[in-house]
Image: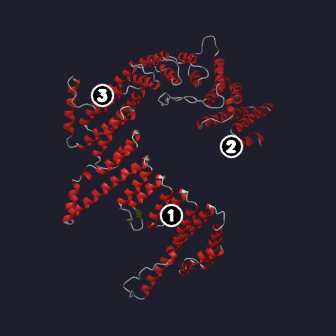
Amino acid sequence: MAEQVQAILDGMVAPLRDLKEREIFSEAEIRSIVSRRRESEYLLRRRAVRKADYLRYIEAEMALEKLRGIRTRRVLARQKRAEKEKAKETGGTGSSKEKKKKNHSGDAHIVQHVHFLFTRVIRKFRSDVALHLQHAAFAKETKSYARLGKIYAEALQVHPRNVGLWIEAASHEFFGHFDETSNERIGGGSVQSARVLLQRGLRINASSQDLWLQYFALEFHHIQKMRGRRAVIMEGGEFKEQQTAAANEETDPLFTEATIPTVVYKNAIKAISSDVTFRLKFLDLCRSFPETNAVESIIMDSVERDFHDKPEAWIARAAYAGEKERSQEENNDSESREDNSSKLVKRQKGNDGNANTVSNKVVDILEEATDHLPTAEMYLESIHFVRDYVTKLLESESDDGERKLISENIKDCNIFLDKLLRKAHNLEMKSARLVMEHANYLASMEKTEDAVNLLEEFVTTNDHSTEHVAVWVHLARMSEQLQPPRSGLPFLHKALKSIPMHDNGYKIILLELFDDILTSQSTVPNGVEKDKYISDLFEQILLLSPGEEYKVVGEKEDALVDLPTRSVADACLQYLRYAFQGGGITAARKVYKVAIRSNYAQSIDGKTQGDMSALRDFFDECIHIEKTASKAHTKRKKKSEIKLHLRRLYDSAISLFSDSVLVDDFQQRRAEDVILA
């Protein structure tokens, strides 16, 4: 062991002597470096060698290299100043030629030693891909670009299933690396090597979407590079042979039709044939490059051919059609007024009863989609897309002619929405989200009465399911928007009768009912005292909240119902303030005692950050009420009673938040308000 360590240290003598002679490091520092390296080498020679010893050794050498770089620049600057002063003294009669820069062995020594350490640790721990990546990162940082190819090759031999390594290696071969000091790109430029790497990666990982997408992007990068080279040659008036070659490239289908990216795409969809999202990612990549219309058309044709039963495919086709219409309008700016006026005349003729010669392609595709795939999911996706499309049309800048055409497109979209929602209603689709979309549309058209009737018809004619809870709540809220307003309480009471108590939706309705009574002038059932009715509702909510919060379950299509719901913690805080405002501290104490003793306030398990924040606010409000009451009383007995209530509140809060960061705040405030007060 000692001989091996000494042999390694003997190899460091010459570069360390060079660093000492150039005054980069002092003699004491050289001794310290050698001592540390000897100790680290002995640690690496143990039988049970640890990866942490290697990493600690490498980290120390990296720090040493940074220090060497700083000191080397300082020494060179000092030498340069000395040369200038000497030249001034001699009257500038120095040699006309500058001395050639000498390569010192000490400058590259530490970097080479770190590479040596990485090689040794990777040999010991070959299965750790992070070590390979750290080695590659160090090579980039120290501009050891010649080593990078070897580093990636060794890593890929051990980790052929790591897709990221294949992509990084191909990127290194094609793009190289940009050197900020020389402002030049070093290495790279080999599209053939990059192709070989990605093709090898795909043979092993044929189902990797990232590899296919990067291969597709690589070919477009290469095409762009060739186009740029052609432009430089044509502009510079280079040799006739180069001009001829550039002219041939201009008509070469490899560039005009992007033949190679098309081949890559076709092979990719053979390997991964059933994922429409994967194909649409290729479309997104095409948008990053110019002149990709031919490839985009091929992608959309394949989506149209293979995915008739996927709503996302239909939506992608509609979005593509909308983008093409907008791009055509932008490309025809010089003729926009004439074109837009002629299109508008044709559209008006079509609306008068003749064939619509210039149709709204987006609407046409969506109509075909909903006819071919009459499902609630397809209808909902179409509705959401049309709304976003209309919003983009309204936000787009346009002249008078385009504005008229846009208004016609928006009119077509609104007609389509109305027809689609009516069709869904006639088909009796039992979708909560769809019926709420229809109700919102009617309300936006100032037909709130029709919206309420639609929601009421849905909940009365369909059997209860969890997603119908959202419709009941929506119905109650929308009824309050009628003219004159109607109370939503009757609908909430009906909901409680139709929903089983064990269903999560029952608690959601209770919370909605509780909030409605506290925040409005709504009346409670006849013959029932309001405060007693509110108290019973509150206790029922706490009984149905055994520690864990409810979740709103989505529909069969796994689409969540978008409904803002109340939380139990918010209800506690809301009721506390209501009781204190109406009945003072006595009523407030009754409320917070019931809440704190319930199962809901015994643990934070299953509670969200919003619930935790609301519970903290609840305890803060309780403490604030007690401290305010303490200041109002001068009798010692009353102050002692309030102090006892404060102690119990703090103890409950500390117990509840014992596993949370909030516990420290309550412990500190307890010491200030109770123990030290």
Mark 2: few/some/many CA within 10 Å (<14, 14-19, 20+): few
Q: Position of residue 8 (x, y in %)?
A: 59, 75
Pick whichever of labels 1 and 3 is earlier in the sequence. Answer: 1
* Screen quadrant of the N terminus: bottom right
Residue furthest out toward the right: 637
* Label 1: which secondary element: helix
Image marks 2 and 3: residues in contact by CB distance under 8 Å:
no
Which numbered tag is attached to residue 619? Answer: none
Whether residue 400 sits left or right of residue 520 in the image: it is: left
Residue picked out by circle 3: 412
**In this rendering, the label closer to the viewer, 1 or 3:** 1
Mark 3: few/some/many CA within 10 Å (<14, 14-19, 20+): some
Question: Between marks 1 and 2, how big is the CA–CA gap?
Answer: 45 Å
- The count of marks equals 3
**In this rendering, the label closer to the viewer, 1 or 2:** 1
Please tell me which residue lies in front, 328 or 427: 427
Q: Residue at x 47, y 53 (%)?
A: 164
Asked if one can make out residue 287 in the rendered structure from this viewpoint, the answer is no
Q: Residue at x 66, y 62 (%)?
A: 48
* Label 3: which secondary element: helix
Residue picked out by circle 1: 138
Amino acid found under the numbered disc labelled 2: Asp
Q: Residue at x 59, y 36 (%)?
A: 610
Residue picked out by circle 2: 665
Q: Position of residue 450 (x, y in %)?
A: 41, 17
* Label 2: which secondary element: helix
Q: Position of residue 611 (x, y in %)?
A: 61, 34
Question: Between marks 2 and 3, how big is the CA–CA gap?
Answer: 59 Å
Please tell me which residue lies in front, 331 or 395: 331
Amino acid found under the numbered disc labelled 3: Asp
Amino acid found under the numbered disc labelled 1: Phe
